[in-house]
């Protein structure tokens, strides 16, 4: 395989770098949580249906709408402790059936797909954590062992069954996402059947029971495009709560070049040189993935510079 550009070996920066201490040690300490909630520096935001309120500031920044706890809507059961920052500010998310009315002329609701490209690292980290908890809470209200309705514990990070005593924890589904390169250092990109015309990205798929993540990379590439891969190397990960995935990013070398798409998940797959991809993006023939996704970062790592990515 040809050598990639020097800047292609730089680490990928993704969500989770906002300096938040999640404070798992405090989640079972109700006295501590009560004091943290009542502290005047504590800040709270509401999450509903995967969205929160954001606002554009006069200085050009976009921020989560945070409020002191004494201004927050009343809720006890669905109050989730997210952690604290380096200044000791504690953060909570409140899960509600609907977001509060707009607090001013500029605050508006937004989901992660939009907000992740606008917010600071700190706000992104808080929002990813809150949305992941909300998704899990909404979908796992009953005990999978006995069917009884469960109750929230550990500041939103556990559900307990009062009937059989089982404890249930937030679900995270591991998924592999990989950039496949051939001997000519071309990248293999595919288009899923339900994507807009021209949208191409890396291949991806879920890890199956009893399978290593490296095995999942080999299997998924073979299933989706009929290409055998070797030299599977881990690069970086990204939380992806849509609704509960953790994307594990890899690069792999193709041992075969013939592409045979499965026609079910992948409708089209093509090998691209850097010049091929540049020309296809400039002409509008190819639409790359969103800049907030690990797929975009894996491609950029090979491509050598940022992609001109459209919105979602």
Image (cartoon, helix red, strand yellow):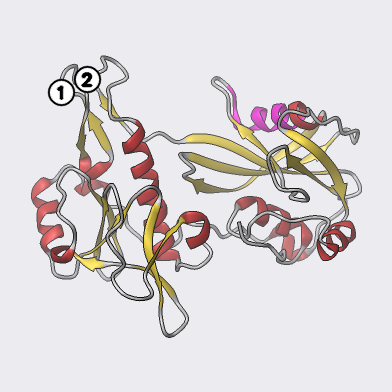
x%, y% of residue 189?
78, 45
Question: Contact (CB < 8 A) between labels 2 and 1?
Answer: yes
- Asked whether 219 falls inside the magenta stretch, the response is yes
Looking at the image, tell me whether mark 2 or mark 1 is earlier in sequence order: 2
What residue span does the magenta drawing correspond to?
211-221
**Foreground mark, 2 or 1?**
2
Q: Main secondary structure of the magenta part?
A: helix
Local crowd at mark 2 within 10 Å, few (<14), some, or many (≥20)? some
Callout 1 secondary element: loop
Q: Which quadrant of the figure contains the C terminus?
A: bottom right
Q: Can residue 144 be seen in this view?
A: yes
The residue lying at 74 percent from left, 26 percent from top is 223
Q: Can residue 19 be seen in this view?
A: no
Q: Which mark is residue 162?
A: 1
Q: In which quarter of the image is residue 259?
A: top right
Which residue matches tag 2?
A: 148
* Residue 116 vs residue 91, the one in the foreground: 116
The residue lying at 45 percent from left, 65 percent from top is 121
The residue lying at 67 percent from left, 55 percent from top is 296
Residue 46 vertical placement versus 171 (above, below): below
Quick check: 81 left or right of 211?
left
């Amino acid at each position: 395989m040809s050598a990639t550009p020097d800047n292609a070996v730089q680490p990928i920066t993704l969500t989770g770098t906002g300096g938040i201490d999640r404070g798992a040690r405090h989640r079972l300490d109700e006295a501590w949580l009560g004091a943290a909630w009542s502290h005047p520096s504590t800040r709270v935001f509401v999450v509903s249906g995967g969205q929160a309120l954001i606002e554009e500031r006069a200085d050009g920044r976009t921020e989560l709408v945070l409020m002191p706890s004494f201004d927050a809507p009343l809720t006890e059961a669905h109050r989730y402790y997210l952690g604290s920052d380096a200044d000791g500010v504690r953060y909570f998310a409140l899960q509600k059936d609907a977001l509060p009315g707009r607090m001013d002329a500029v605050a508006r609701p937004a989901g992660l797909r939009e907000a992740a490209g606008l917010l600071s690292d700190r706000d992104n980290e808080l929002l990813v954590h809150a949305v992941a908890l909300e998704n899990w809470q909404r979908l796992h209200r009953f005990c999978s062992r006995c069917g009884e309705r469960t109750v929230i514990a550990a500041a939103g990070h556990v559900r307990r069954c009062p009937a059989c005593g089982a404890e249930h924890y937030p679900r995270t589904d591991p998924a592999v996402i990989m950039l496949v390169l051939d001997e000519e250092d071309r990248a293999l990109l595919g288009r899923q059947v339900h994507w807009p015309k021209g949208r191409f990205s890396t291949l991806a798929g879920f890890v199956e029971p009893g399978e290593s993540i490296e095995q999942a990379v080999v299997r998924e590439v073979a299933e989706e495009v009929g290409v055998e891969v070797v030299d599977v190397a881990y690069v970086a990960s990204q939380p992806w709560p849509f609704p509960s995935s953790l994307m594990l990013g890899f690069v792999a070398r193709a041992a075969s070049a013939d592409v045979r798409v499965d026609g079910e998940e992948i409708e089209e797959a093509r090998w691209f040189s850097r010049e091929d991809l540049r020309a296809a993006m400039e002409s509008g023939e190819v639409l790359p993935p969103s800049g907030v996704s690990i797929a975009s970062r894996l491609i950029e790592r090979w491509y050598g510079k940022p992609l001109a990515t459209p919105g979602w």
